[in-house]
Amino acid sequence: MAVLSCLFAALALGVAACGDDDDDEGGQGGDGGGSVTVYSSLPLQGASRPQTTAMVQGIELALQQANNQAGDVTVNYESLDDSTAQAGTWTPEATSANARRAAQDESAVAYIGEFNSGASAVSIPILNEAGLAQVSPANTAVGLTTDEPGADEGEPDKYYPTGERHYARIVPKDTIQGAALATVMKEDGCTSIGILHDKEVYGAGLARNIAGSAEEQDLEVAVNTGIDPKAANFRSVAADLRSGGVDCFVFSGITANGAVQLYKDVEAALPDAQLYGPDGVAESGFADPEEGGIPADVAEKVKVSVATLSPDEYPPEGQEFFSTFEEEYGEPNPDPYAIYGYEAMTLVLDVLERAEDPTDRASVIEALFSTQGRESVLGTYDIDENGDTTLTDYGIYTIADGELVFDQTIQAAG
């Protein structure tokens, strides 16, 4: 648990990175097969900390089970922080510094990150030019990989200056999440919905996906506009929703961008409305009032979509993961994202074993994009030519006593 201890020390000291500097230049492993380094870059401070701490634990558990080996290569791991204490969320500066650090480390062969799609929009071009394999355990923004509905102008080509792909993700993209949210709103009897987004890559793109899927399902989209995430309150936009006659509201964004105050203001303006949110607010900083989240009387009206399911909805490998996680960390109800941290590292280890030369970055990328029929804790999936997973399941959660409670699985086609 040296890395985790280092993580907590870094959090306490407010520094951006941790790891053993002795490993920075790589070197020979104990078995003579050489050594490589895998970096992760996640927001370890602010509202996302419970999720990303669980992710780091999942990453470390996967590495521990493999005895830090992939074939005959020793795998070192360095956990980096793309957030700052002042911002309380990821920042472009911290993200860029992390990507450049990994890019300049000759022993680096893979990079797990980012957690936020907006952060990946910063790191992808840097790592693309470095030819370093990147696996996101959480990104969903459509435009990071395709120009399908939900993508912005110039996406995704602007993220790949070399014209080659190096980035993959293990979470279904937002065409799937948008369809899942529209489907559950339709099932709940919504007729006219209001969408507000935080104007980030993730939030604005997902808002387009929700709106498109809602219209396909004959739901009226009465409002779809961006907010000022730094506003002191959102009473004005909440009044616009009321004037628009919406009976269901969904915020497309992350907790750090004013989500808690926004839901309180919308609930006050529309006390009979049903409220929805995406994975960007699926965290204790939003759900738990003791951690600054929404109050219980608002939470009882909220449903949240996350690309994670109840443990008993996963294949046997996934259920075994939750048992092992509890044995290792004493946590019987881990954050849903723990399994994605675990799978991200397990995929990287598998890729290194399959790569013709696991110490060569180009060889590692080639192996990553040849992933087919992978039987994992999440289920069986491929990585397609764009870097997207073929998984499509989304979980819908309610909130009770400050915690997310699994409600149902939505199988949506994007």
Image: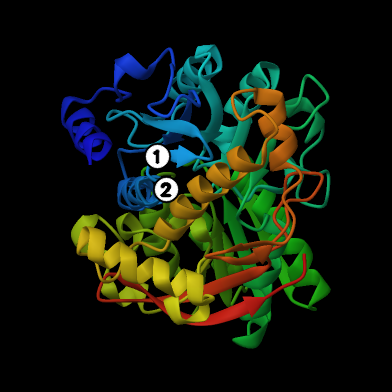
Expressed as whole percent of the image width and height from the top left, the position of residue 113 reads 52, 37
In the foreground, 30 or 354: 30
Query: Mark 1 is on which residue type?
Result: Asn
Circle number at residue 66: 2
Whether residue 304 appears in this view of the structure is no
Q: Secondary structure at mark 1?
A: loop
Residue with the mark numbered 1: 68
Drawn side of residue 36 relative to residue 385, left or right: left
Expressed as whole percent of the image width and height from the top left, the position of residue 377 reads 52, 65
Quadrant of the rendered image containing residue 324: bottom left
Quadrant of the rendered image containing residue 189: bottom right
Graded by Cα atoms within 10 Å as few (under 14), some (14 to 19) or many (20 or more), the crowding at tag 2 reads some
Query: Mark 2 is on which residue type?
Result: Ala
Drawn side of residue 211 relative to residue 297, left or right: right
Expressed as whole percent of the image width and height from the top left, the position of residue 255 reads 41, 51
Q: Name the residue rendered at 54%, 76% in the picture.
A: 315
In this rendering, the answer to whether 156 lies above or below 395 is above
In the foreground, 147 or 368: 368
- Label count reads 2
Graded by Cα atoms within 10 Å as few (under 14), some (14 to 19) or many (20 or more), the crowding at tag 1 reads some
Q: Name the residue rendered at 83%, 43% in the picture.
A: 147
Whether residue 41 appears in this view of the structure is yes
In this rendering, the answer to whether 142 lies above or below 119 is below
In the foreground, 414 or 342: 342
Q: Name the residue rendered at 79%, 44% in the picture.
A: 386
Dots 1, 2 in contact, CB < 8 A = yes
Quadrant location of the N terminus in the rendered image = top left
Q: Secondary structure at mark 2?
A: loop
Give the Cα distance between marks 1 and 2: 5 Å
Drawn side of residue 208 relative to residue 296, left or right: right
In this rendering, the answer to whether 300 lies above or below 108 is below
